[in-house]
């Protein structure tokens, strides 16, 4: 065997090596950081009103830390999903390229078509009547998977297609989870925070609000009585009081 043939085989082997464990150790923290920031963006998308620009980038990174433990777990699952897609490309796609029986092909297409119609219907329902952005996103992902396999099964098993889809799905889920977290904080039945606001040396006014974020510029809150958001500078805050949540009372 010539050296050219050996080099060609080595190149093919490297191309087929796919994702490695070493890649996972690099991707997991990077993807987790991206997911945490995406969660923060989803949170402020629900708040709206340009509230995201009221805080600095370093503050947003600090806020996103609270979602980092979950983001690490999700990123590990996503990277594992990329591994699985790579393995399916190596072993499952060659089998799918065979013709097989006509009844088996019709069954597979019928199953994918049924799933596509079902998940599309659920997506429409949750869009108009649902109360969870996360549920809506999961339905969209499921419908997309069914549509992809209905159009081309072999293309869906390719690592570049599967890896991109898994990562995009993860970021979409993180965005929706942040959006739902903001909505949960807004409609929560937990005890409200009391803020006494006023100029120094004068008697302040106390408001019962839901504190969402605190930063260098002040306190971002939601007024449940007026159904509005607000930012109070620290210079006007005289006192902040909060009660223990009922979930911690025993």
Image (cartoon, helix red, strand yellow):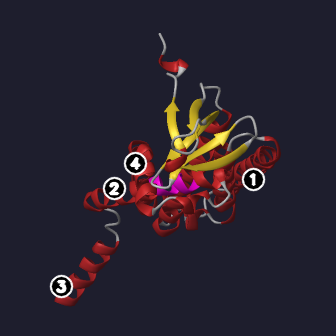
- The magenta-colored residue range is 35-42
Q: Measure the alpha-carbon separation of dots 1 and 2.
A: 37 Å
**Could you say whether the residue bearing mark 2 is in a helix, strand or loop?**
helix
Q: Badge 3 is on which residue?
A: 1
First in sequence: mark 4 vs mark 3: 3
Q: Badge 1 is on which residue?
A: 113
Q: Badge 4 is on which residue?
A: 65
First in sequence: mark 1 vs mark 2: 2
* Label 1, residues with CA under 10 Å away: few <14, some 14-19, many ≥20: some
Tell me: residue 192, above or below residue 66: above
Mark 2 near mark 3, Cβ–Cβ under 8 Å? Answer: no
**Could you say whether the residue bearing mark 1 is in a helix, strand or loop?**
helix
Mark 4 near mark 1, Cβ–Cβ under 8 Å? Answer: no
Q: Measure the alpha-carbon separation of dots 4 and 1.
A: 41 Å
Q: Magenta includes 12?
A: no
Q: Measure the alpha-carbon separation of dots 4 and 3.
A: 56 Å
């Amino acid at each position: 065997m010539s050296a050219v043939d050996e080099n060609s085989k080595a190149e093919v082997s490297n191309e087929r090596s796919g994702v490695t464990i070493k890649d996972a150790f690099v991707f997991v923290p990077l993807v987790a950081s991206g997911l945490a920031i995406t969660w923060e963006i989803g949170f402020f998308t629900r708040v709206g009103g340009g509230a995201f620009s009221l805080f600095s980038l370093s503050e947003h990174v600090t806020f996103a830390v609270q979602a980092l433990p979950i983001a690490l777990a999700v990123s590990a699952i996503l990277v594992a999903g990329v591994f699985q897609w790579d393995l399916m490309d190596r072993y499952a796609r060659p089998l799918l390229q065979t013709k097989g029986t006509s009844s088996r092909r019709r069954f597979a297409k019928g199953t994918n078509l049924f799933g596509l119609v079902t998940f599309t219907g659920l997506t429409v329902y949750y869009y108009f009547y649902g109360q969870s952005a996360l549920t809506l996103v999961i339905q969209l992902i499921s419908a997309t998977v069914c549509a992809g396999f209905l159009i081309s099964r072999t293309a869906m098993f390719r690592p570049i297609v599967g890896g991109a889809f898994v990562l995009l799905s993860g970021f979409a889920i993180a965005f929706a989870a942040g959006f739902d977290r903001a909505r949960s904080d807004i409609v929560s039945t937990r005890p409200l925070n009391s803020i006494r606001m006023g100029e120094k040396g004068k008697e302040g006014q106390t408001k019962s609000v839901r504190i969402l974020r605190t930063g260098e510029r002040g306190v971002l809150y939601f007024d449940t009585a007026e159904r509005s958001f607000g930012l109070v500078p620290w210079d006007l805050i005289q006192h902040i009081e909060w009660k223990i949540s009922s979930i911690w009372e025993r």
